[in-house]
Amino acid sequence: MAAGVKSYRSLEGDTLDALVWRAYGRLDGRLVDRVLEVNPGLAALGPILPAGTEVSLIEDPGAAEAESVRLWG
């Protein structure tokens, strides 16, 4: 598994949106798209993931942005 990628197993009835919400604390379409990119074939499983499906989660790209402070423009 690549650096900055964590693994998560889906729970019964999980959707990718719910999984992203739990993992990152927010629902962001770009984040969902990125998770789909690193998990080929995940979308083919349908909207409700089978329980125990391993999903690789990327490092939150918005975390660094949220922690930084912009002083000028």
Image: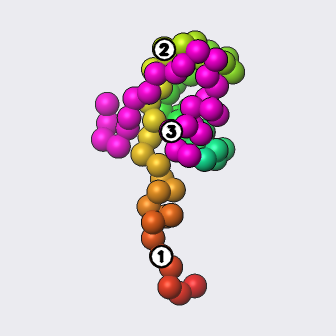
Q: Earlier in the sequence, mark 1 or mark 3?
A: 3
The image shows residue 68, relative to residue 73, as above or below, that is: above
Colour theme: rainbow
Q: Are marks 2 and 1 in contact (CB under 8 Å)?
A: no
Q: Amino acid at mark 1?
A: Val
Q: List the single residue furthest toward the bottom.
A: 72
Which residue bears the numbered disc 1? 69
Q: Residue at x 49, y 64 (%)?
A: 65
Cα distance in 3D space between marks 1 and 3: 24 Å
The image shows residue 71, relative to residue 32, as above or below, that is: below
Q: Magenta residues, as a range?
A: 1-25
Which residue bears the numbered disc 2? 52
Q: Residues within 10 Å of mark 3 (few under 14, many from 20)?
A: some
Q: Position of residue 4 (x, y in %)?
A: 35, 43
Question: Of residues 11 and 31, which is closer to you in this image?
Answer: 11
Q: Are marks 1 and 3 in contact (CB under 8 Å)?
A: no
Query: The N terminus appears in which quarter of the rendering?
Result: top left
